[in-house]
Every structure is written in C-alpha cells, then in structure tokens.
Image (cartoon, rainbow, N blue to C red):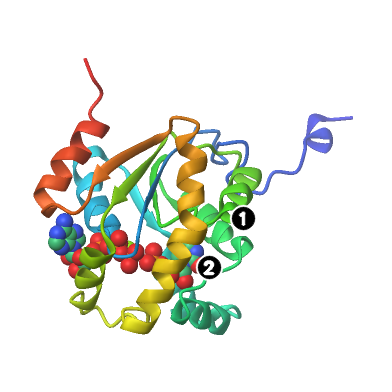
Amino acid sequence: MGSEVDAPAVDSTKVVNGCLSNDKKVTVVFVLGGPGSGKGTQCANIVKYFGFTHLSAGDLLRAEIKSGSENGTMIQNMIKEGKIVPSEVTVKLLQRAMQESRNNKFLIDGFPRNEENRAAFEKVTGIKPEFVLFFNCSEEEMEKRLLSRNEGRVDDNNETIRKRFKVFVESSIPVIEYYDAKSKVRKVDAGKSIDEVFEAVKSIFTPAN
Ligand SMILES: Nc1ncnc2c1ncn2[C@@H]1O[C@H](COP(=O)(O)OP(=O)(O)OP(=O)(O)O)[C@@H](O)[C@H]1O
Ligand SMILES: Nc1ccn([C@@H]2O[C@H](COP(=O)(O)O)[C@@H](O)[C@H]2O)c(=O)n1
Ligand SMILES: [Mg+2]
C-alpha cells in the first residue's frame, strides 16, 4: 500500500500537536486579566515590538456575530450577559485564525477564560502556552476604564460589568492559579499608566542575557 493511503487524515485548517499544517511549531502566550485591565492596549504594543500576532477571543466572537454565523445570536446573548461562550465555538475560531496567519507566534488575549476553555484548547491543538501574561488591576480602576471606553460595546454598562467581574473571579482566576502552580504566570501591575505597564511588559518579553 502507498503511504498516501496509510497516512492519517490531516485537516489543513487546523492546528494539531502544537503545529500548523506546514509543521511550523506554534508559540502561544495567553494574555489574561479582568475586564478593562488593558489586555488589548498592551497586546497592540507587544505586536509592534516583538512581532507577535494578536488574537483576541472577544474580537473573534464579535466578528463571528457580524459575519451572520448560525451561532451569532447565541454569542451575542452570552456577551450581553457576560457569560462564557462554549469552548467548542471559541477554540475553532482561534484555531482557524492561527492557521490562516503567516506568523507562528501568537498572543491569545482573553483566553482561556475558564477551565473548560483551557482543557479544550490544549486537547484540540496540543499547544501549551510559553507563559501567561496576567494584568492585575483593581475593579475600581477597571470599571472606570470600561465606562469611558466608548467603543459601543454591548457589555460596557454597569449591569454587565458587574457580571463580568463575577465571572472573572469565579471562573478565570482559577485558570491563572492553575498556571501559577506550574510557574507559568508573569504578573504585571496594570493599575499604572499605559507606558509604565508596557515597561514592565517589555522586561518580560526581553530575554535576559
Ligand atoms: N494603563 C492604563 N491606564 C489608563 N487607561 C487604560 C490603560 N490601559 C488601557 N486603558 C484604557 O482602558 C480601556 C480598556 O482597555 P482595553 O480595551 O485594553 O482592556 P481589555 O483588558 O482588553 O478589556 P476587555 O476585557 O473588556 O476587552 C481602553 O479605553 C483603554 O484605552
Ligand atoms: N474566551 C472567551 C473570551 C470572551 N468571551 C466572551 O466575550 C466577551 C468579551 O470578551 P473581551 O475579552 O473582549 O472582554 C466576554 O465577556 C465573554 O462573553 C468568551 O465567551 N470566551
Ligand atoms: Mg479587550
């Protein structure tokens, strides 16, 4: 029998065993922190300085709503309620975005949000993060930032912000603790100015001599 027949089927749209379909190894940094802690703002800086591609799980979900996907209404309702969308949906979007990218270094922002996200991503892609960048910020400061963000997001209102904070404490902090137990968390004081926070971020991404 020829090797073509024996070879396992590989879905070229997927990242499996930690590799893209061209066999390039994938490097992933998870970027976590409460709503409004500055994940998106700092990721934009990291992209410029360190050549990563930024994938925001929230942005991918919002794009999925706009695309008219069959999951659009469900995703919209979950975001409005500050709830976490089923991992199957989010992992597929992340996997597709990584495969479509020409880069192999990704900042995955706002993911994993809960234990289900974490386990599903690892099982499906085979990727373990290099480290987890954690933006630590008080709720008072995060609330102030979210209420003055003015991007027209359906979840930037007092009622949804309360729910998002609760989900962060109950579901996302345990994920940070999981990685902390593996010494993978790099914690940054995100309550400072954007420039000060980026100075701390730079020192994390700059390899020591
Ligand atoms: N260090 C900072 N000091 C003051 N304002 C900031 C700081 N970092 C970000 N901001 C502002 O706070 C708002 C929220 O920032 P950003 O969108 O980066 O947060 P996020 O963590 O991605 O939030 P979300 O989880 O809701 O997507 C934005 O308007 C941004 O300009
Ligand atoms: N892993 C994720 C990430 C996000 N969501 C939903 O999107 C909302 C907005 O996310 P941001 O990171 O842009 O703040 C979030 O509150 C969730 O409803 C998700 O379900 N899973
Ligand atoms: Mg964001």
Query: Measured along the vertical axis of the image, is residue 104 above or below residue 146?
Result: above
Q: Position of residue 16 (x, y in %)?
A: 62, 41
* Circle 1 SS class: helix
Q: In the rendered view of the protein, which quadrant contains the N terminus?
A: top right
* Quarter of the rendered image showing ligand 1: bottom left
Asked if residue 61 can be seen in this view, the reply is no
The amino acid pointed to by label 2 is: Ile
Viewer-proximal residue among 66 and 89: 89
Q: Position of residue 31 (x, y in %)?
A: 37, 49
Q: Which dot marks residue 84?
A: 2
Write down the residue under mark 1: 116
Q: Position of residue 193 (x, y in %)?
A: 10, 54
**Mark 2 Cα within 10 Å, few/some/many (few <14, many 20+)?**
many
Q: Are marks 1 and 2 in contact (CB under 8 Å)?
A: yes
Q: Position of residue 28 (x, y in %)?
A: 43, 40
| Residue 34 lies in quadrant | bottom left
At x 62%, y 36%, the residue is 17
Asked if residue 16 can be seen in this view, the reply is yes
Label 2 CB, ligand 2: below 8 Å? yes
At x 39%, y 44%, the residue is 106
At x 45%, y 82%, the residue is 80
**Mark 1 Cα within 10 Å, few/some/many (few <14, many 20+)?**
some
The amino acid pointed to by label 1 is: Glu
Q: Is residue 49 left or right of residue 195?
A: right
Label 1 CB, ligand 2: below 8 Å? no
